[in-house]
Structures are given as C-alpha cells and as structure tokens.
Amino acid sequence: MTGDEADRVADAATAEVDGDVERVVKLPDAYYVVHVITSGGEQHVLVSKDLQVTGTQQGGPAFRPGGDDDGGAPASPSTPPSGSGNFS
C-alpha cells in the first residue's frame, strides 16, 4: 500500500524500530504489518489502526491472521502468536 495512510503507519513503525521501510501491508482485521530493514536484518512491525505498535517479529515471513499478505502460501511462524493482531 502507498500514500498518506501508509506514510503514517510507516512513521509509527520506525518510531519503534530504526530502519528503512520496505513495504506496508494492511491486514483484514484493520492492523498493518510494516517490513522494516534494519542493520540486523528485517523486522516485521505490527501496527494497530490507532497507529500503536503492538508487536515485532524478526525476519522471515510476516504473520497474517488467516492467510498471506501477497497471494502466496500462508506464513507459518515457528511459534504462532495468540489472538488477532499479536506477535509473540
């Protein structure tokens, strides 16, 4: 996603995790996953519709409740987060 909404979400994510935003994905439950490239690798930052960072996850496929974020196979984190919109 792009535009003002994506910029606001990216700003919220990079206020918590220092790095360059690769992309912002809006999830069906009104959360966003922001892919941030850091000096230590990639971080996936979960941001609420109220622009609050609610979790982070190191690299690998992003967690997306109920499916994937780009039409590929569903992500399968090693320990799935519990509840909608939560990272472990």
Image (spheres, rainbow, N blue to C red):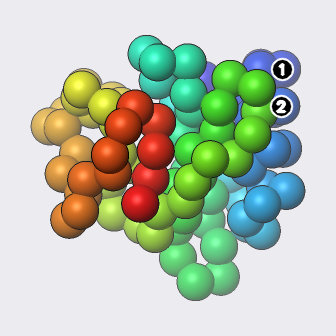
Residue drawn at (23%, 45%), measured in percent from left and top? 75
Asked if residue 76 lies left or right of residue 44, the reply is left
Residue 40 place in picture, x, y as percent: 58, 83
For the N terminus, which image quadrant? top right
Residue drawn at (36%, 37%), measured in percent from left and top? 83
Residue drawn at (31%, 31%), measured in percent from left and top? 65
Q: Label 2: state its secondary structure.
A: helix
Residue located farthest toward the front when viewing the structure as drawn: 83
Q: Which residue is mark 2?
A: 8
Q: Which residue is mark 1?
A: 4
Residue located farthest toward the bottom when viewing the structure as drawn: 40
Q: Amino acid at mark 2?
A: Arg
Residue 25 place in picture, x, y as percent: 52, 31
Residue 62 place in picture, x, y as percent: 38, 49
* Contact, mark 1 vs mark 2 (Cβ under 8 Å): yes
Q: Which mark is residue 51?
A: none
In the displayed structure, 2 sits above or below 62; it is: above
Residue drawn at (77%, 68%), measured in percent from left and top? 18
Q: Amino acid at mark 1?
A: Asp
